[in-house]
Structures are given as structure tokens and as C-alpha cells.
């Protein structure tokens, strides 16, 4: 797994659910990822019972329900954990992605702006 490859993000979800809560959580996870321009792979557990078991085994919870988020094989968490990380400005840390140092980024922008004149 490459530490900079956001495409390693995997979201286990279900296209078949009678639960409004599951549907809402899944929708919110993909909305947050899209808003942050994070590429991800959707894995539909409803097409194969083995995918459900794989998701639960990787999450370490035999009762886990979708959505469950992973970076490669590393478990990141569920919707609630992602929501809390987003609220605490720890979204990239939650996804196990490199954190952008805002101070360095601002300095680089200022340097580029200065040399761009």
C-alpha cells in the first residue's frame, strides 16, 4: 500500500438495505469522500456473502454493518468514527493518509507566489 495513494480507500457498503440509517450513513460517507476529493473503491457486500464476512473479519467485529471504511487492509472505522474525525479536523488521519501541514503549505504557496512575480 502506497502511503500517498488515496485509491487504496475502500468502502464496504450494500446496495440492498431496508434500513434508512444504513442508506443515510453510506450516502454521507461517499459525500464526505467526494467533497474531499478522495478516490475510493466501493465494495458491495450484497452481491456475495463472503464479502460480508470479509468486511466483518477485517473490521474485527462479527456484527459490523456497512458502511465500513478501510485503507487497504487497515481498518479506519465506520460512519460514526468518520463523522467524528471530520468534526475534529482529523479526516486524513482517520483515513490513514499523510496529513498536509497547513503551515508548510501556506509557506510554499507564499514562496511560489513571490517567485511567480
Image (tube, grey):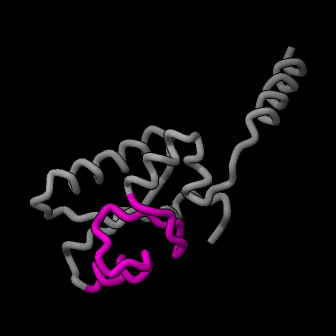
- Name which quarter of the figure residue 102 lies in: top right
Q: Is residue 114 above or below residue 2?
A: above
Horizontal placement of 29 versus 1: left or right?
A: left
Quadrant location, the N terminus: bottom right
**Span shown in magenta:** 50-78
Q: Residue furthest left?
A: 18
Q: Position of residue 21 (x, y in %)?
A: 20, 52
Q: Position of residue 80 (x, y in %)?
A: 39, 53
Q: Residue furthest top?
A: 117
Report the number of numbered marks: 0
Of the pair 76 and 6, the residue shown nearer to us: 76
The residue located at (52%, 60%) in the rendering is 7
Q: Is residue 107 above or below residue 99?
A: above
Quadrant location, the C terminus: top right
Q: Is residue 103 above or below residue 85?
A: above
Residue 65 lies within the magenta run: yes
Residue 11 lies within the magenta run: no
Horizontal placement of 32 versus 101: left or right?
A: left
Q: Position of residue 88 (x, y in %)?
A: 56, 41
The residue located at (22%, 81%) in the rendering is 48
Q: Is residue 64 above or below residue 25?
A: below
Of the pair 18 and 116, the residue shown nearer to us: 18
The residue located at (43%, 75%) in the rendering is 59
- Name which quarter of the figure residue 63 lies in: bottom left
The residue located at (50%, 39%) in the rendering is 87
Q: Position of residue 51 (x, y in %)?
A: 30, 80
Amino acid at each position: 500500500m502506497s502511503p500517498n495513494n488515496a485509491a487504496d480507500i475502500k468502502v464496504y457498503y450494500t446496495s440492498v438495505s431496508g434500513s434508512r440509517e444504513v442508506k443515510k450513513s453510506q450516502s454521507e460517507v461517499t459525500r464526505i469522500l467526494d467533497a474531499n476529493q478522495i478516490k475510493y473503491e466501493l465494495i458491495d457486500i450484497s452481491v456475495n456473502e463472503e464479502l460480508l464476512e470479509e468486511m466483518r473479519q477485517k473490521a474485527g467485529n462479527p456484527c459490523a454493518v456497512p458502511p465500513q471504511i478501510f485503507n487497504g487492509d487497515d481498518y479506519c472505522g465506520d460512519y460514526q468514527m468518520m463523522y467524528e474525525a471530520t468534526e475534529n479536523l482529523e479526516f486524513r488521519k482517520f483515513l490513514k493518509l499523510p496529513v498536509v501541514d497547513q503551515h508548510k503549505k501556506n509557506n510554499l504557496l507564499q514562496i511560489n507566489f513571490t517567485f511567480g512575480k
